[in-house]
Amino acid sequence: MELGKDVLKMFSFCERCGFCRATCPIQTPLEWLDSASPRGRVLLIVGLLRKELEPSEQVLLRLAECTLCGHCYVTCPQGIKLNEVVPKARALVREAGVSLEPYERVVETIAEYGNPYGVDRELRHSWTEYYDVEPEGRGEVALWLGCTTAFRRPDTAYAAYRILGEVAGSVAIVEEEECCGAPYYLIGEMGKLREQLERAIEAVEKTGAREVVSTCPACVRSFREYSREVGVEVPFEVYHFAEYLAARGALEKLGAEVEPLRVTYHDPCELGRAMGVFDQPRKVIESVRGAELVEMQANREHSNCCGGGGMYFALEFENSIAIAEKRLREVPSGVEVVVSACPSCEVTLSVAAREGGVDVEVIDLAELLLRGVEK
């Protein structure tokens, strides 16, 4: 969707419509502030495009208070994909010389450390030492961890590596992996996105892999979608972990089985609504004998956000966790494990469960599979 004519064309309808507000995850923590609603953001963007509104920190803050979950698109009669429009609008404001301190901190941290968390580069593959494995640096299939998996979900990193090894045989890790550039896209820093993507592609090419698999939807989108936004060609195929397993028909071969366990699946916004991947993760869960999948009432394209997307976690931590706590209240009775397929979702939901005293475990698809395989 274009930032200019498409949004302007729909402006008159947005003035009269407010269907989207009920689906916006930040409306509750921000007490239904209209300028921070999807409709309000469209009006702000139109003001910028018509030169009726000057770029300012306050305008950028309202644009930044969006998790880019895309839930408003599901209910929008005009089909406005704000999850595609808002990053472009953020870029427009940044090009005018306006920024926010958390955004600048992200830019500086990635430049210095190669990741948005400020963790030493040398620690990206520390999970291999913890689990005492020695992955190869070259192979037909490469595992791209992503920063959140590498530094916040090491159990997922190991599980994905083990399961891919069962399916593909030899699996390489990307020894020189850095941030894929997705945070730059989210804050509207398109020039740096291109540079970061080019470095990421160069690092993958050193593995010789023709297929790249990641447990992170944001990384997958960075290679598959954001690359087109900045004119970068990706010379290999990129899959989400669930997509790869389903495409290879590998689930029956794994023969995973666990003790009777009630689980629910949280659809990540980027994997689900943004990429249309709904069935494959469920097939992964259903392949594990003993695991009973109990759906949340809000699922698939109507799944509610975890609060961790769109760089909102870095901007408003407490509000982000409040959104995650609200999502956990939708977990069906008797469910012991919440399974997802996005490390950012897993981080926010895990923190919310701990902070809110919710007695559920939050794990990745790969972790569930590994438990079944090891048993």
Image (tube, rainbow, N blue to C red):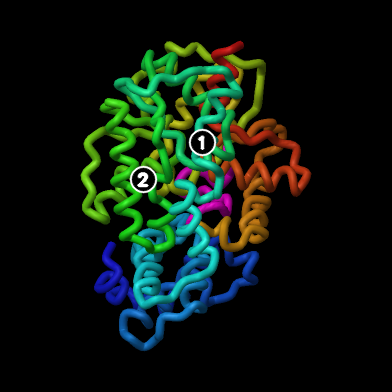
Q: Nearer the viewer, residue 17 or 69?
A: 69
Residue type at mark 2? Arg
* Residue 106: percent from left, percent from top: 49, 58
Displayed quadrant of residue 312: bottom right
Point out the image quarter for the N terminus.
bottom left
Mark 1 / mark 2, whichever is N-terminal: 1
The residue identified by callout 1 is 122
Q: Nearer the viewer, residue 237 or 34?
A: 237
Q: Name the front one of labels 1 and 2.
A: 1
* Residue 94: percent from left, percent from top: 39, 71
Q: Is residue 267 visible?
A: no
Residue type at mark 1? Glu
Outermost residue on the right side: it is 357
Displayed quadrant of residue 87: bottom left
Q: Is residue 43 visible?
A: yes
SS at badge 1? helix
Q: Nearer the viewer, residue 85 or 231?
A: 231
- Is residue 309 rendered magenta in the image? yes
The Cα–Cα distance between marks 1 and 2, rounded to whole angstroms, is 25 Å
Residue in the image at 40% along x and 68% along y:
90
Magenta-highlighted residues = 295-310
* Residue 183: percent from left, percent from top: 44, 54
The residue identified by callout 2 is 221
